[in-house]
Amino acid sequence: MAYEDLKCISLEDVPLNCKCRVNFIDMDFESRIRLYDLGFVPESVIVPKYTSFLDSTKAYYVKGTLIALRKETGSKIKVNLLKEDKA
Amino acid sequence: MKEYTVALAGNPNTGKSTVFNALTGLNQHTGNWSGKTVEKAVGKYTFEDTKFLVADLPGVYSLYSDSAEEKCAKDYIVSNEADVVVVIADATCLERNLNLCIQITDIFDNVVLCLNIIDEAKKKGIIIDVRLLSETLGIPVICTSARDGKGIRDIKKTVFDICEKNIDVKPKKLGFKDFENEERSRNYIKKTEEICSDVIKNKGKASFLAEKADKVLLSKKFGIPTVIIMICLLFIITARVSNYPCDIISSFLSYIGERFEYFLNTTPLSPQVISLIYDGIFTTTAFVVSVMLPPMAIFFPLFTFLEDCGFLPRIAFCLDGIFSKADAHGKQAVTSMMAFGCNAAAITNCRIIESKRERLIAIVTNNFIPCNGRFPLIIVLTSSFIANGNLFIMSAAIIAFIVMAIGITFLVSKILSMTILKGMRSSFVLELPPYRRPQIGKILVRSILDRTIFVLGRAITAAAPAGALIWLLQNIYVGDISVINAISEFLDPFAKVFGLNGIILAAFFVAFPANEMVLPVVYMCLGGAYAVSDIGNMASFMTLLCENGWTYVTAFCTILFSMNHFPCATALLTIKKETESLFWTFMAFIIPLFTGFIVCFTANFLLNLI
């Protein structure tokens, strides 16, 4: 069983290969819409998969595709971690 | 004959251009890379005695963002210029692609949905209920694999039937188009999710091999080393393989040259005019073709191969960390890599960078990467003056020069972004497309054909006039010295400050139409050869240079100046075309030149201290 952590963190802080669910995007309207179009829409499930050299960019698995975002964008996407229930 | 207009719309990298080419038989450039099509392309086809005009719109994710491409696509659809809009969706990730389709059906009636790349979707085990999808949307849905030409006839037939009113398309209107901005976007996305959860019966599995490849290529540890190996292989193959065609083309052109000279001698032309045509124009053009064509015809198919496979966006991802430190865009890694082949082609490719500020940085700094035309000079002088023929030292020195070129690119990018191009770093959003099987046959035919046309075009427009100019400068005398030597003497004191000499500096200016002409012009000015193509014997060339006072400092500074000076005429014209600004064209000219003077002055000063 998976449950959702109520604490909201930034997507940038989600460890690699951990699922999370988008809560909201703390950016201007244009950037928000652009991210929605790419699949970073509230309620969608995202998995950070790879991080680039110098940690400036991460590739996220979202709606069947890998999308790379820089740190400053990832830090403005607020998410809830999806954790596996050990019980 | 009746004529209708069809528009192709879709997300980036869904194969719109491939569908466009399959429909029209044209060769619009395609690549496994989002945003290849940056402006509307137009083509034609005939079906059932009816003409169809096809407009390939730029790839967009939505109709409601503010980018130029999205406005262009939306304006075209709203203008009702098209009789039918065919929305191309990637069947392997329908949920991402369907959003645009339902936005279009909300504002336009005659819409056809084309599920492209259906063969790959099937391989991945993805099952889509096409009938249910068609019923839900209220529009015809066609499955295609445009690369293999499958389903193209179905598109033509459906479009024909809609235009001839044999089919009445009544898309289900959602009415979200009138909602407030954010509400509208979220409603469309929610509806897309709903439809997809109904029609996608099996989501399939990611390819095992692709995942393994990504684990290496996108990893923090192995990503950059893999990219470096890939780039080195690209150079080694280009250098090794191009030697053979270079020799063949050179021998062939020599044979043609002999016949041509014989023919010219049978004409009533004066010996001076014959010399101008043969020694000036023909031999210079022949030299450019034989030196430039083979590396270009090998480098670019290999580059397109990487592009087709889907490696380029991954390279951009790996190197983005470094580029972000210079406040530049990650995609600049790809345009810089392409610049090793040809600066002009790379400048055109800078269109893939969405932000204007970062695109300008990429364009202005592109010239710091030495192209095919400058490599022969770097290799010849490094081998003779720095490495003394030692292969290991030569390879290390050339790698050091390349690293230096990349370092200067970063430094100038950083300076530009802190000064005249000051501004916010744009958000870097990059889709990493699935790996795809490259279309090797098409790559070979298209790249070789494209490059041959490019090099021949350049030979006619740049090298031939340059050949005539060199001949005139060499054969018109001011007092008892030729014009070129008079210019060289005039420039000499100034050039000496930078470790060069007047002849070298004059050669760079004379070779403005084509960079590959620098060494041959130096050779001619020193009286080593009457014509450019005589530069066959490297040993005698080196002896000639040494006799004329060349030292390793001169060679080193000449290499540095070759890497850091104004772009060639073709690149400069491309910059003017791409930036539509005289100011930026001037900056692209002056910044590398100024950098070159600083670098050469410093190198000359330091080397003379040793």
Image (tube, grey):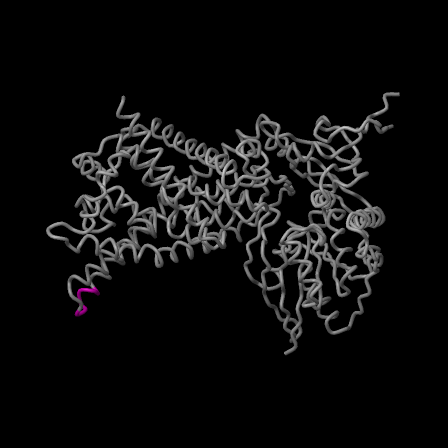
The residue at the point 17 percent across, 55 percent down is B475
- In the image, farthest residue toward the right: A87
Main SS, magenta region, reads: helix
Q: Please provide percent x and percent y for residue B262.
A: 20, 62
B266 part of magenta stretch: yes
Quadrant housing the C terminus of chain B = top left
Q: B73 above or below B550?
A: below
Residue B163: image quadrant is bottom right
Residue B299: image quadrant is top left
Which of the two residues, B46 or B6, is positioned nearer the viewer here?
A: B6
Q: Is residue B2 left or right of residue B582?
A: right
What stretch of residues is rendered in magenta?
A: B263-268
Instruction: Answer whether residue B200 is visible to the viewer in this image.
Output: no
Which of the two residues, A77 or B214, is positioned nearer the viewer here?
A: A77
Quadrant housing the N terminus of chain B = bottom right
Q: Please provide percent x and percent y for residue A72.
A: 65, 33
Q: Please provide percent x and percent y for residue B201.
A: 82, 46
B70 part of magenta stretch: no
The residue at the point 62 percent across, 34 percent down is B213
Q: Please provide percent x and percent y for residue B312.
A: 56, 41
The residue at the point 84 percent across, 28 percent down is A6
Q: B204 above or below B457?
A: above
Q: B608 above or below B269?
A: above
Q: Is residue B200 left or right of residue A12?
A: right
Q: Is residue B440 left or right of residue B95?
A: left
Q: B352 above or below B226?
A: below
